[in-house]
Amino acid sequence: MSIDEPWPQEGRERMIQPAPVGIVGTGQPNTEMELLAKLDADHVMMMGDNPALPRFPERPTLMDFFRLRFQGITERHLLVSAVRALDDGQDEKVVVACLLHDISNGCLIRSDHGYWSAQMVAPYVSEEIAWAVKYHQPLRYFADEANGYSYPESYHAFFGPDYVPPEYIRRDAEEARNHRWYMTSRLVTIYDTYFFDDGPTPDPEILTDIIGRHFKQPEQGLGFDGSPTAHMWRTMIWPNNFL
Ligand SMILES: [Fe+2]
Ligand SMILES: [Fe+2]
């Protein structure tokens, strides 16, 4: 992979089969049979860089994923959360947990996003930061007025006022409440709000030093360092690969 290399599978139509997790249950047709029937010398299933997406540098960094892949809302939401924590003088680990808390929503998967996000970043951050990212998901459903956290208005709008979180969410929230890192994760939920997401998108530059201190950027680049979660980062680089 290099910026100057020609696009792969040149001269042929590169067909994209969307990921099952993105279409199942939505009513969108599954096109797999149709696409497979079209395979011939001029039609292949897409593998490698998609010209419709910006190309990554050889050794991708965390910020490359923010710039080149994340959906606008997630990019903005993560930067706003982190900068609000920073402006409030929170510990750097809280700032970084805020910056990463919804990272799987950027370009990978939404369902159980806290758990996915924590797993993705775990090889590169402290255990406490990954823990805070994971548990922000269950903790979001439970108010802690004494520490300044109410049940989010947005959740009433998202899920309906009668929504009841499932058993595993209740169990994990309870476990988190009794943990010594509870407040690290609770602070993530406190800075995790869309109501402050107006105004300009913060410049990620102001977080460069903090990221440098708390996110162990692998030398070979995210996706290529052989970590247990390298494949998740590669999937975001090549989200349209057939296999
Ligand atoms: Fe979240
Ligand atoms: Fe969030």
Image: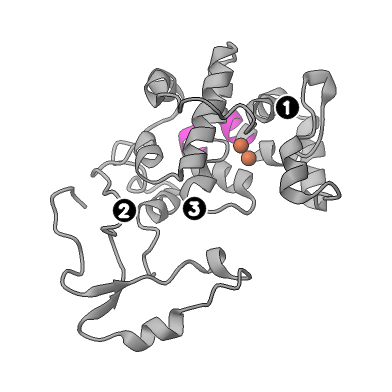
Q: Position of residue 190 (x, y in %)?
A: 69, 26
Q: How far apart are marks 2 and 3 (CA)?
A: 15 Å
Q: Which is nearer the eye, 194 or 146?
A: 194
Q: In which quarter of the image is the C terminus?
A: bottom left
**On screen, residue 21 above or below 195:** below
Judge: label 1 CB < 8 Å from ligand 1. no
The residue pinned by badge 3 equals 108
The residue pinned by badge 1 equals 182
Mark 1 vs mark 3: in front? 3
Q: Residue 53 carries which label?
A: 2
> Seen in the image, is 26 located left or right of residue 149?
left
Q: Where is residue 220 in the image (x, y as percent from the top left)?
A: 28, 41
Query: How many numbered circles does the render carry?
Result: 3
Few, some or many residues within 10 Å of mark 1 (<14, 14–19, 20+): some
> Dividing the picture into quarters, in which one does residue 70 lie?
top left
Name which residue type carries label 1: Tyr
Q: Which residue is drawn at 58% across and 11% down?
A: 89
Helix, strand or loop status at disc 2: loop
Q: Residue at x 31, y 53 (%)?
A: 53
Magenta residues?
Answer: 122-131
Q: Distance between the residues labelled 1 and 2?
A: 39 Å
Name which residue type carries label 3: Leu
**On screen, residue 202 above or below 48:** above
Helix, strand or loop status at disc 3: loop
